[in-house]
Amino acid sequence: MQDQPPDLDWTDRGVPVSRRFDDPYFSLDNGLAETRHVFLAGNGLPGRFTPGFHIAELGFGTGLNFLTVWQDWIASGTEGPLRFTSFEAFPMAQDQMAAALTAFPDLARLSAQLVAAWNGPGQIALPGAELTVIAGDARLTLPDWADRADAWFLDGFSPAKNPEMWDGALLTEVARHMAPGGTLATYTAAGHVRRALAQAGLAVERRPGYGRKRHMTVAART
C-alpha cells in the first residue's frame, strides 16, 4: 500500500467504490446511519465525550466518520477540541471527497469546511476539532505513533478484500494504542478479527450489525 489517490467507480446513487478492493466506501443503504450505529453507538458516543477526547481510526476514506462525530461533538457542547487521528493509505483527492460527501446533506455545512481545508494528509485545524490524517500503510505507521486513543474506529475495506487492514499484528498495535478504558468498534464480525482482538487482551463482544450485516464487533480495554 502506498500514499496515492484511490481509483474509484461511482454507483448511480453517488457512492464511491474502490476499484482496488471492489468495495464501497460506505453503506449502499444509508452511510450516515451505519456510522452512527456502528462507530458512535458501538463506542458509547456521544455519551462518553470528555474534554480532550481522542478518537483514532483505520481508514479515513471520505471523512464521513469524522464529520459525524464532529457534528455530535459540537452539539454536545463539550469543552475543548475533539482530537481525531486517522490512518489512511489511499487518501482521496479534494474533488473526490467533495463528490462523495454530497450524499449527506445533513452534514453539508461541516463537509464544506473539511473539503475547503483538505489538502491531503497532515494536520487540519477546524472549529472545535483537531484532525490528523497519517498517510501510508498503517502496519508501518501505527507502531511509531506516540499517542493512545479513547475510542477506535476500525473501518478498512472488508477483511476478505483488504486482509492487510485486519492483520493480527496490526490489531495488536491498535490494542496497544488504546487508553485505559478505551473501546473500539467495527462493522465486521469475522471470526479471525474477533479472535485477534481477544488475543491482544481486549474484551470482545458481538452485537447486531447495521442493514445487511447481521453482526458487528465491539471491544474494550478493561
Image (cartoon, rainbow, N blue to C red):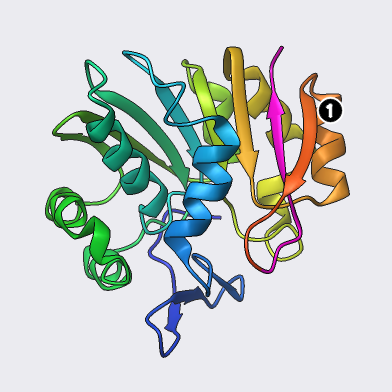
Does the magenta run of residues contain 41? no
Region in magenta: 212-222
The image quadrant where one finds the C terminus is top right
- Left or right relative to 179: residue 160: right
23 or 213, nearer to the observer: 213
In the rendered image, which quarter contains the N terminus? bottom right
What SS does tag 1 mark? helix
Q: Is residue 9 above or below residue 5?
A: below
Residue 215, magenta (yes or no)? yes
Q: Nearer the viewer, residue 68 or 140?
A: 68
| Residue 142 pos. (x, y %) | 55, 30
Residue tagged by mark 1?
A: 198
Q: Residue 210 location, x and y as percent?
A: 63, 58
Residue found farthest to the bottom: 12
For label 1, count other residues whose C-alpha is less than 10 Å away and answer few (under 14), some (14-19) or many (20+).
some
Instruction: Say which residue appears at 59% left-offset and 25% top-offset.
Output: 143
The one nearer the camera, 209 or 84, is 209
Up-down: is 157 above or below 58?
A: below
Residue 73 lies, in percent from the top left, at 29, 32
* Amino acid type shown at disc 1: Ala
Question: Which residue sits at x=52%, y=27%?
Answer: 151
Residue at (58% x, 20% y) in the render: 177
- In the displayed structure image, the side of residue 82 where residue 167 appears, left or right: right
Left-right relation of 220 to 120:
right
Picture coordinates of residue 123 (x, y %)? 25, 34
Q: Is residue 69 above or below residue 49?
A: below
